[in-house]
Image: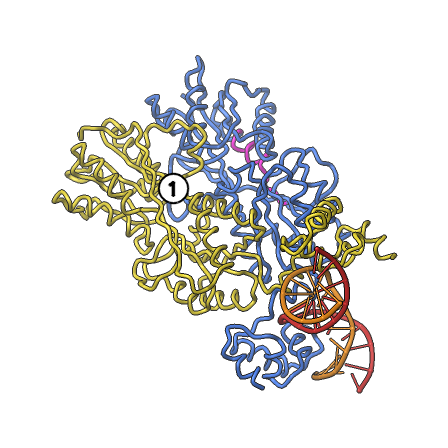
Chain colours: A blue, B yellow, C orange, D red
DNA sequence: GTGAAAGCGCTAACAA
DNA sequence: TTGTTAGCGCTTTCAC
């Protein structure tokens, strides 16, 4: 009795206390809250209303132990690729995924694992049981995490793909190859022949696909990607600037650029203007970017043409996919989705090459 | 017996199985692994070695229930301020905090709560018990989360401060006021008198402090901040561009700018160059930025002068503080740290105003 | 439709 | 120093 009195004055309450308060058994209350069918509607409604009124929430620690499910999903960021988490694209993805998790009452756990013994980190993750599944970020062409997670029988969804891996696995990716082929064709149609490509590091699967999109489009018109007009590196302003500057100093400089990120684009613009040229008049620039949020809300950035797709949406899709894999049978074939990138044409592309 | 045989072939093992394997009691093993003193060194070493060899890790769900501690920290991001998570500064902070958590075997939980009923979200968080404490991001001047968390008796550390709140609470902040006062003095010393300030939204505590730093420095020389030379808004490229463009069109335009973020800086540069002016020659720009990682690794961005401080370090400090609060007595006075921002002077500041 | 009771795998008194 | 035992708060058979 005393217990019940005090329960109301505590920040938190147990199922036993709460059910005693309602004059019901813990079992019934648990079932009512858990959405199990074998409860009378009136009972359920009453339980739910009272839970809300008294702010009762089942202790997540206890239900995790009892069910054996963590109700949590891990997003693992290798510390080595420190740039990964800094990436606004990553933040957007996470934010989309987070929406889905909170809708399904799952936690999102961000683990920064130091690359030293990545395999061990995943083994630990599995055996501690604090997540039911993971999202794999920034896959390399032949990413070791994929076979590892398969071996551990840990459900996972890859954001992107690992082209060198042939066994089936679940992934969600944006059609990078196509987006870059389109951008290239767009420039080619306007007569550009010398197109500079400034890309991300090519161990990353997405960067490789983007280059392939460019080369394929060139090839289709009997052209090849001039090594002098190609650069792959970190996607920073400084790198974009340096790469563009070098290319612009060539005997026959490019008449257009394709850049793998908006940040590279800022650098490229700097190099162009330093040469006394003007973007959109003297030289075309197409910037690929996956939904960079600080260019949203009515920003007027006419000097960029962007190929954008909602990475946030990709996050939502991947999260939903993973939750389904966790809930459903483990032997279902891995679902995957290829999202088409949206192509936005702005004012900066000059129709006629200089 | 059979149980033990199979345990080795399973992905995961219980304490009971593991301890039986070693011929010890579960208690002893638990103590050895948990670092409790009352275990013979030889025993502990053996247990640790075997745990490693057999990849035994205690089930986190069970230990959470048994101890009543979640071994997890929450970072709550209001969805309303969607820009929050997109922010590279936020990513850096998170990454620093994450380092500390993984060193202390704590999980980092990212919750995206929809701003609709934020209070309820925190109550739920508390009563579900899936975190031991939280980090509060992006505080407003009079942030409602602070009294709420205090009422809930949930340990928390604020990244930044809420100036209108007088009750003591734990926070970690960069000295924004001083950084901006310094930047202002720097420009004033070179003779600048018309300095444009392009700031973040002023409900955010950091933005208010930055403006205060500027006005105080001006005031100390008998000057005031001209309303025409002040703009506060979202920190996007487009906003920076628009604000700078407006100011540059004034009858007496500014001879220098101070910008609250590198992204604003990119926009300001665009406006300047569009006017046919050149940064660092015709006009000075000082950009404040908290360790924007994509300007790191040897980037050569001479046109920016930046006041930088390691937000990553702030993340580390805040995380360590919170872990200590969780572990220690609840009645200790809240610790707080004011980190000084590093001032980096580059080549873009022209000594003589135009 | 509801309740009693037995775990989930660990930790922490208390004993030895 | 080690082991025995009783929970932590929930879910889930199994009876009623």
Residue A63 drawn at (x, y percent):
65, 66
Percent position (x, y) of residue A239? 45, 27
Residue closer to the observer: D16 or B18: B18
Q: Is residue A113 above or below residue B162?
A: above
Which image quadrant is residue A255 in?
A: top left
Q: Which residues are magenta?
A: A172-184
Residue under label 1, please give it.
Answer: B290
Q: Pointer 1 indicates a residue of which chain? A: B
Percent across and percent down for residue B14 are 75, 57
Q: Is residue B321 magenta?
A: no
Residue furthest top in the image: A251
- Res. A157 in view: yes
Left or right? Give the position of B17 relative to B237. Answer: right
Q: Secondary structure at mark 1?
A: loop
Left-right relation of A21 to B209: right
Q: How crowded is the residue under tag 1: few (<14 C-alpha within 10 Å), some, or many (20+)?
A: many
Residue under the image location 32 percent in, 54 percent down: B205
Residue A155 visible in the current orientation: no
Compared to A47, does D2 lie above or below? above
The residue most toward the right is B2
> Between B148 and A337, which is closer to the camera in this rendering?
B148
For the image, the number of numbered tags is: 1
- Majority secondary structure in the magenta region: helix
Q: Residue at x 67, y 34 (%)?
A: A142
Where does the image place residue A166, in percent across and percent down from the top left? 73, 36
């Amino acid at each position: 009795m005393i217990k019940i009195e005090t329960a109301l004055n505590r920040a938190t309450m147990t199922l036993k206390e709460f059910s005693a308060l309602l004059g019901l058994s813990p079992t019934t209350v648990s079932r009512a809250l858990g959405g199990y069918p074998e409860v009378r509607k009136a009972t359920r409604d009453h339980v739910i209303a009272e839970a809300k009124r008294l702010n009762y929430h089942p202790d997540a620690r206890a239900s995790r132990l009892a069910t054996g499910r963590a109700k949590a999903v891990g997003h693992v960021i290798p510390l080595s690729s420190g740039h990964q988490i800094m990436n606004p694209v990553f933040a957007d993805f996470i934010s989309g995924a987070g929406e889905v998790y909170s809708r399904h009452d799952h936690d999102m756990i961000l683990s920064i694992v130091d690359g030293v013994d990545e395999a061990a980190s995943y083994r630990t993750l599995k055996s501690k049981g604090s997540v039911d599944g993971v999202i794999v970020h920034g896959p390399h062409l032949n990413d070791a995490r994929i076979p590892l997670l398969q071996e551990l029988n840990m459900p996972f969804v890859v954001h992107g793909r690992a082209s060198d891996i042939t066994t089936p696995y679940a992934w969600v990716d944006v059609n990078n190859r196509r987006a870059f082929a389109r951008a290239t064709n767009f420039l080619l149609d306007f007569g550009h022949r010398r197109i500079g490509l400034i890309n991300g590091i090519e161990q990353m699967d997405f960067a490789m696909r983007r280059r392939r999109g460019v080369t394929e489009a060139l090839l289709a018109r009997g052209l090849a990607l001039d090594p002098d007009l190609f650069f792959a590196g970190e996607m920073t302003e400084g790198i974009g600037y340096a790469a563009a500057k070098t290319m612009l100093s060539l005997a026959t400089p490019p008449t257009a650029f394709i850049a793998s990120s908006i940040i590279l684009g800022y650098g490229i613009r700097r190099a162009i203007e330093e040469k006394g040229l003007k973007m959109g008049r003297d030289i075309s620039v197409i910037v690929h970017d996956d939904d960079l949020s600080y260019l949203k809300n009515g920003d007027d950035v006419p000097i960029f043409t962007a190929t954008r797709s909602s990475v946030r949406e990709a996050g939502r899709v991947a999260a939903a996919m993973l939750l389904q894999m966790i809930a459903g049978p483990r032997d279902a074939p891995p679902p995957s989705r290829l999202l088409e990138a949206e192509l936005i044409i702005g004012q900066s592309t000059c129709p006629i090459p200089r």
